[in-house]
Image (cartoon, rainbow, N blue to C red):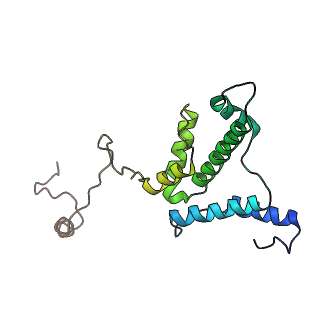
Amino acid sequence: LYTGATTQNSCVSTQDALIKLFTFKQSKPIQNTDYLKKLKELTELVAFHGTIIGIEEARVKDILKTVVNDKNMPTAEEIQLAKDKVQEQFFTILLIRQTDKVRFGQLITDLENSFIMGKDRYPKTITKAYEILVNYKKSVPQTHDPNEHGVSYYTPTDTESTQQDANNGDTNTNTRDNRT
C-alpha cells in the first residue's frame, strides 16, 4: 500500500501523488535508469489513486483515425489501443521534459524547435525516449569561428619595458633626434 492511502483524505492523497509526479525532475546525480524507474513508480502511484492522466479525447480521436478498421464504429479494443497510445505519448514527453536540463536541455529545445518547424520528432514510446536519453550526445559549443575576425592586443615584453625605462619614459626608441 502507498503512503497516505489509508491515513489521509483520498483527495489529499491523490493530489499529493499528482504533485510528486509533476514536480519530480531528474537532477545531475540521478542516473537515467533510476530516473525512469522513479517516474514509473510515480505514475503507478497516481494510477493507484484512480486518476487517469494523459488521455485527452481529441488526441484519442486522432489516433483512432489511424488504427480503426471501420471509422464509424471503432471497437472497444481499438478505443483502448488509442487511449493507451495517447497515454504513453503523454508520459514519454513528460519523461523527456523532466530530465536534467544541464545534460538534456539542448535535446528538449531541439525537439520543441523541430515541432515548430512542422516535424514532430518527439519519441512516441517510453522505450524510445529512454534509448534517446541513454545515447544522447550533447553538442559541444564551438568556441572559435575561423571566419570571425577578432581584436588583438600588444603587450610589451620585459626587454621592451626595460628599454623604455632606460629612455627615461621616452617611448620613441629611435636613436635619431626628432627635433627640427
- List x then y, in percent, for residue 149: 31, 43
Image position, residue 11 (x, y; %): 87, 62
Residue 126 located left or right of residue 61: left
Foreground residue among 60 and 107? 60
- Rendered location of residue 60, percent (x, y): 71, 37
Residue 112 visible: yes
| Residue placed most toward the observer, 49 or 93 | 49
Q: Residue at x 70, y 25 (%)?
A: 70
Residue lying at 41% horizontally and 51% vertically, measured from the top left: 139
Which residue is drawn at the image coordinates 76% and 52% (left, top)? 52
Please tell me which residue lies in front, 157 or 141: 141
Determine whether, in the image, residue 178 is placed left or right of residue 151.
left
Q: Is residue 23 visible?
A: no
Residue 80 versus residue 71 in the image, above or below? below
Please give the name of the residue rendered at 41% of the width and 53% of the height, measured from the top-left corner: 137
Instruction: Name the quarter where the N terminus is drawn.
Output: bottom right
Q: Is residue 120 toward the left or the right of residue 148 in the image?
A: right
The answer to which quarter of the image holds residue 17 is bottom right
Above or below, comparing residue 10 to residue 112 in the picture = below
Q: How many marks?
A: 0
Relative to 131, residue 124 above or below: above
Locate residue 14: give its quadrant.
Answer: bottom right
Residue 68: percent from left, percent from top: 67, 30
Q: In which quadrant of the rendered view does residue 153 lie? A: bottom left
Q: Residue furthest left?
A: 176
75, above or below 29, in the image: above
